[in-house]
Image (cartoon, coloured by chain):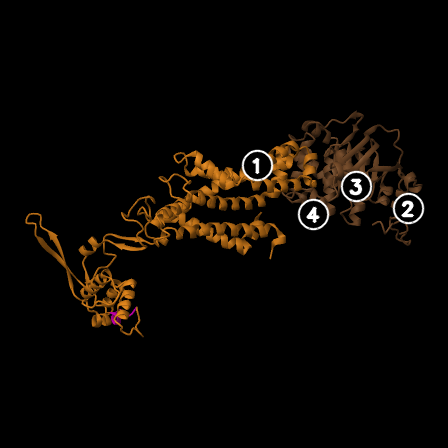
Chain colours: A orange, B brown
Amino acid sequence: MKNTLKQVFHSSKFLVGFIIFLAILLTMFIYPLVNPGNPLQMIGVGTFAKPGTYVSLYDATKTSTETLRLPDADEKRLAKLLTNEDRVAMVEWFTAMQISVEGLDISDTDAMIDLWKANYDPAVKPKGMTQAKRNYYKRLNNSIAEIGAAETLIITEKNEETGELEEQGKITKTDYVNTNAVANVKRLPLGTDNFGRDVLKELISAAGTSLLIGLLAGAVATLVGLTLGLLSGYVGGFVDDIIMFITNIFTVIPGFVLLILISYSIGQEQRGATVVALVIGLTSWTWTTRSVRSQVISLRNRDHVNLSKLSGHSLFRIILTDILPYIASYVVMAFILQVSSGILAEAQLSLLGLGPRTTEVPTLGLMMNWAMLYSAHTNGSWWAYFPVILTITLISFSLNLMNTGLDQVFNPTLRD
Amino acid sequence: MSETKTRQSKDFTNAPMCLSGRGVTKVFGLGDKKTVAVDHVDFDFHVGEFVSIVGESGSGKTTLSKMLLGLLNATEGEIQFMGKPRDISSGAKKREYWKGIQAIFQDPFSSYNVFHKIDSVLLDCINMRGGKNLPKEKKIEMMTEACSFVNLKFAELTNKYPFELSGGQMQRLMIARIFLLKPKILLADEPTSMVDACSRATILDMLLDLRDETGMTIIFITHDIGLAYYISDTVYIMEHGKFVEFGKADEVIINPKAAYTKRLISDVPKIHEAWDLSTVDLKAE
């Protein structure tokens, strides 16, 4: 046993898979301790806030400032203000005005603005340009003009009695606040989803739920498959015929269709994470049954089984002590694969809107479902679905890698 | 040949019957794929007799042995055990039957459950003989006795796994197991074909000792007619699922009647003579 474990951990494939899986598992346990709270709490009012650090503007204005004179501050400000589309539009204007843009670097903000100031004239009407387009250039010109202008912003507050605005403070371009000093700073490494929930927190909670669903589904599938396979293979005869009849029926019906039909007929209200896991488990045991059965058939006529029979051991005891230990490694591998496919099945089901009901827990599949319903994939909100896909892939990959590693240890013909 | 034989086979024709069969048949498969492995064989094994069943590979020896053990059901025929029709219709009756008949298999390496220690193999035997509630010291004493019968030291084997022993030691441990179980019949299915020549002689001697000590019937299955001649009282020659010849070992082997028996005898390699290959039909192979 000790030797086997040593061998298992000597397999580089198993080790890589195990480390990835352990890292995911540790994150799932540690992150909620560091960052507690309900993962389904809607913190954002809008949808799909971009990933980044959010600093409370209100608190920032109330925070004592430091003056920093950074040489490239203006340049950066300009660069941020002029979007890429604006820059392309500016080049279009230059071309329309027949000004040579050769050698002009679109990302060189200073050069762009200099060229713009030198050449823009609101009175000119280039041939073929619509009124709307010309208005757009006017607005663009205004905002470019403003960049250099206002040196100071004044914060005012309305006086309740007089109704006049009273100056509260000024913000100059060289004022900086330390983010550590601001009362409210929220880091959203993966932004928010369509409901304004912290995607990272949701993702970690969802990975946990999905893994539990996978484990439960895998355990159910392996247990059912193993029991039926052992009985069918060892007892043989009539029992074998009946079990194989049922198994064949379940094998020819596409499992996923069955899964969809069962999930649909259960109804949204009854469909918790546990129920979904059970349904997945109960529709995916057939292959385990078949392979366990064939393994048992090859085992049941071995001499040690015959000897055990001759020693007067009961059927139950022979299956438990003379058959099961010999196929244990195989069963462990089958279980790992079942967990992996259970997670995938949940994701598929949820993507179709047949997953666990949405009010209690997030799952990886549900997150993808929400992202899809709110068109995250078409409006460029990659953070709402890509990390989910990556997590599913990583879990599945690590489990399969462990399985392959185990296979190589237990099946010497596959060793490199 | 007879000059080198050290022991004479005894005559058991008048001894009480132990296991006998009439028209025992085993057919595998159906229709075109039908294979008759054992074809209407009759046999009478007597108490205390050392019987050899000799035949080449595929002649049905192992199928017959499985039927005798009750691990396979006969397609046809009747088997009598201790003068009464054998009844193995239920699990409990089978267990009762197996108290009377035990086996040693060909391959010692696959005969043991690799997850069980030697102690548990031997303890199982004591439990089966109804010694479950004996004090621990008594059990150890019995196991030590059984091991010393086969020249093994129990103190060295305890807490070891069977696969840590050599093939010969494993097969001897099997005999120790039989020594503890003391069945009426021992079915030894080519117990020496997987062990080296020295261990083979030791094991055969132990089987003879076991027979002499307990008076059990030993059914020895082998492909080696020389071995059968050396060891047995009665010999059954099996070809294509049928007994072509049987009788006292001396008579059958010194005056073989069936052509098959003659061929088997001529196939035994002799150290000082040229090997006679004239009976081997090379084209048929």
The mark found on residue A94 in the picture is none
Q: Which residue is mark 1?
A: A249
Residue reaching furthest to the top? B84
Nearer the observer, B203 or A377: A377
Q: Earlier in the sequence, mark 2 or mark 3?
A: 2
Secondary element at tag 3: helix
Secondary element at tag 4: loop
Q: Position of residue B88 (x, y in %)?
A: 72, 28
Magenta highlight on residue A109: yes
* Dot 4 alpha-carbon crowd within 10 angstroms: few under 14, some 14 to 19, many 20 or more: some
Give amino acid for label 3.
Answer: Met
Question: Based on the displayed image, in which of its 4 quarters is residue B262 positioned?
Answer: top right
Chain bearing mark 3: B
Q: Which residue is mark 3?
A: B206
Residue occupying the point 57% across, 39% down: A226
The mark found on residue B4 in the picture is 2
Give amino acid for label 4.
Answer: Leu
Q: Quadrant of the C terminus of chain A?
A: bottom right
Residue occupying the point 12% across, 52% down: A157
**Considering only vertical position in the picture, is B273 above or below B206?**
below
Q: Which residue is mark 4?
A: B165
Between marks 3 and 1 in the image, the one whose residue lies nearer the viewer: 1
